[in-house]
Amino acid sequence: MKIKDETLRIGLEIISKPIKKRTDEEKLWVKLHGGAGKLRGVKEDLDFNIKIISNGIKRKIEWPLERTLDPRTGTAKRIYDELVSFLNERTFEDLVQAIAIFREASNWKFKRKDYNYEPVEKIKKDILDSKDFLNISFPIPVEGIKNYIVNLKSKRKEWQSWHKDRIDNENTEKERLKLIKRYKVDSNTSFHEVKKIEASRIRKKLGIGENLNLELSKELIENINKNVKQVEGFLYIRTWKVSNTKWFKIGITNDLGRRESEQNVLPVAAETIATAKVASMDHAKIIEKSIHKVIKKYKIKDSNNRELFKLDPENLASLLDLFKKIDLRK
């Protein structure tokens, strides 16, 4: 059996020795590569595959084997997330797992012409960029393995800051492109400039001056609006067509969307023709009661709902005009 992969060759050479004859460096090297058990398992699997597939024909052996990834499965993303998790830890075992992923990713292949490998290729590049940052190259030398691991642990701490900065930069670029698209500005506009444009638009929308703390003002307004929304009230006019006659309902709600989805008072389709926002549900109740009192003469008799009215065009126009005048949104 001719072994092409140098890491496998070194590993099998070490485990072929009796344990007592292995140096401390050799033992540590084997441990960094997953242990003697893993190396023996790889050899047994390869020997078995050679015997079955090749009928005894000698082949060059590689480890890990080349792997063709299907980009639709999300396997590459999962492996990358595992690598990040391992490198963000501090234990030796996490380094062992990371080394295994670096070796596997180095052998990823993209062979199917009908697959879009671009996302997987990016993940592979990200993995190999981390490998290069950690100064890992295969085969890892046996001699000086103790110092190698000490340096690797130190480099891993640097990687954690490097990786965080890299993610921050990627997120910044994504936000830059998103804002460029939203505000339709030149594609070469810097992140700083496009954020200034965003801030200017927000200030204009909220009526915030240049001399104010934008973030604080924005947070104050959003929090107040959130709490006010819980007590604000709305009036609405809905209409139903019954035979050749239109019936109208003047009602109140604290949630227009929910009210639209609620069951109609009549088994026919309804249409909301006007709404008005007022300061609170208490205001809405008072206004509704006042309107009902004035237009009670137009109420439909024998109706189970006291809010149903029959209105001619002029009367409806007066109500619509009132809604415009009391609507706080205008």
Image: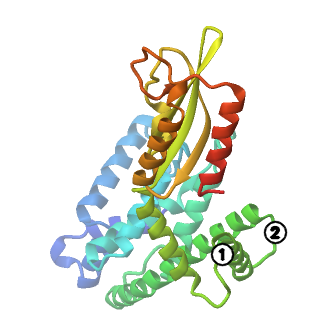
Asked which secondary structure carries label 1, the reply is loop
Q: Is residue 134 left or right of residue 92?
A: right
* Residue highlighted by disc 1: 207
The residue located at (47%, 31%) in the rendering is: 261
Picture quarter with the C terminus: bottom right
Is residue 1 positioned above or below 244 on the image? below
Residue 157 picture location, percent across and down = 39, 86
In this view, which residue lies farthest toward the left? Answer: 20
Q: Are marks 2 and 1 in contact (CB under 8 Å)?
A: no
Mark yes or no: residue 73 visible: no
Eyeballing the image, is 154 above or below 51? below
Label 2 is placed on what type of residue?
Val
Q: Quadrant of residue 247?
A: top right
Q: Nearer the viewer, mark 2 or mark 1?
A: 1
Q: Position of residue 238 (x, y in %)?
A: 56, 30
Comes first in the chain, label 2 or label 1: 2
Q: x and y percent of residue 234 in the render?
A: 50, 47
Residue that mark 2 sits on: 185
* Relative image position of residue 98 (x, y in whole percent): 38, 69
- Rounded to the nearest whole Å, what is the CA distance between mark 2 and mark 1? 23 Å
Outermost residue, top side: 243
